[in-house]
Image (cartoon, rainbow, N blue to C red):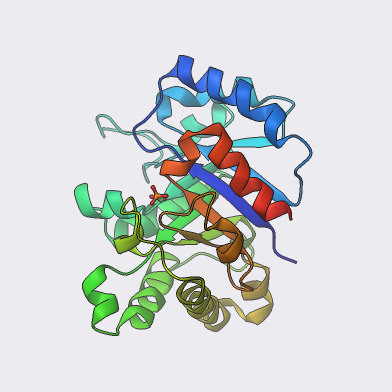
Amino acid sequence: MRRTVIAGNWKMNMTPSQTKAFITELAPMVAGMDKCDIVLCVPYVDIATAVEAAKGTNIKIGAENVHFAESGAYTGEISAAMLKEIGTEYVVIGHSERRQYFGETDTTVNLRTKAALAAGLKVILCLGEVKDERLNGITNEIVRMQTKLDLLGVSAEEMKNVIIAYEPVWAIGTGLTATPEQADETCGVIRGALCELYGCEVAEATTVQYGGSMNDANAAELLAKVNVDGGLIGGASLKTDKFTAIVKAANA
Ligand code: PGA
């Protein structure tokens, strides 16, 4: 059976000292809540501190992006090997903010995904439609296309280390949440595309999260849906009590 994964995406928030304080406070609050995996994806400079603070707890640490080259003249970028060496386990790839503000395309998302998997990182691959696409009734086509393009050349074996985060762009940071029915349906469409790519056994074993204004108040009904295997949480992952409430909902 696929795992439920509750992952925080801190975005550009928290310094290393704030990171240490946050994880020290969070760890006892989520101790023993083992029906889901708990991940915090944090800014690069916070990773080493986060890994140290999370030692011996059930909290795993991820990065928010990774470059696709092994090394070389890519000023300002970070490689998968660098992340691995400091104890990073997960990496978010293709977040809509990267696609929107930093020119990320399905091609670069695919390259990053393959580089991360080759280095032994677990990938949280983000995709989802923008508002006009949903209004025009082409959500299913968009997420199917993104799923297939972003995973080009990724093997069925490597899918063990891939989590998909379905994140409707109109719901991210807006306070608008997809209804549980919308989230369930579109996560199901993504699973259908995975079934076409890898066979339904692999598709059934792949975690497909929902992300977009998930919070302590709406998590339980989203997570109750059969195709929603967890959440990628932005704003609500910056408060230990709110994040814990979501983890608790996933453990109910
Ligand atoms: P949000 O962000 O929970 O603040 O909407 C989700 C995300 O960007 O992953």
- Between 85 and 226, the residue placed more toward the observer is 226
Location of residue 210 in the rendering, given as x and y in whole percent from the top left corner = 50, 62
> Horizontal placement of 115 versus 188: left or right?
left
User: Residue 189, how many percent across, how many down?
Assistant: 48, 80
Foreground residue, 77 or 215?
A: 215
In the picture as drawn, the residue positioned furthest to the front comes out as: 217
Residue 137 visible (yes or no): yes
Q: Residue 103: tell me if it is visible.
A: no
Residue positioned 62% across, 40% down in the render? 244
Quadrant of residue 178 in the image? bottom left
Relative to 241, is 189 on the left or the right?
Answer: left
Quarter of the image containing the C terminus? bottom right
The quarter of the rendered structure image containing the N terminus is bottom right
Above-or-below relation of 218 to 144: above
- Count the marks: 0
> Is 229 on the left-hand or right-hand side of 74?
right
Residue at the image point whose x is 36% and y is 54% from the top: 94
The residue lying furthest to the right in this view is 32
Q: Residue furthest top?
A: 17
Query: 155 above or below 79?
Result: below
Residue at (51% x, 64% y) in the render: 154
Residue sitting at x 69%, y 24%: 55
Residue 69 in picture, x, y percent from top left: 36, 43
Residue 145 in percent (x, y) is at 36, 76
Quarter of the image for residue 202 reads bottom right
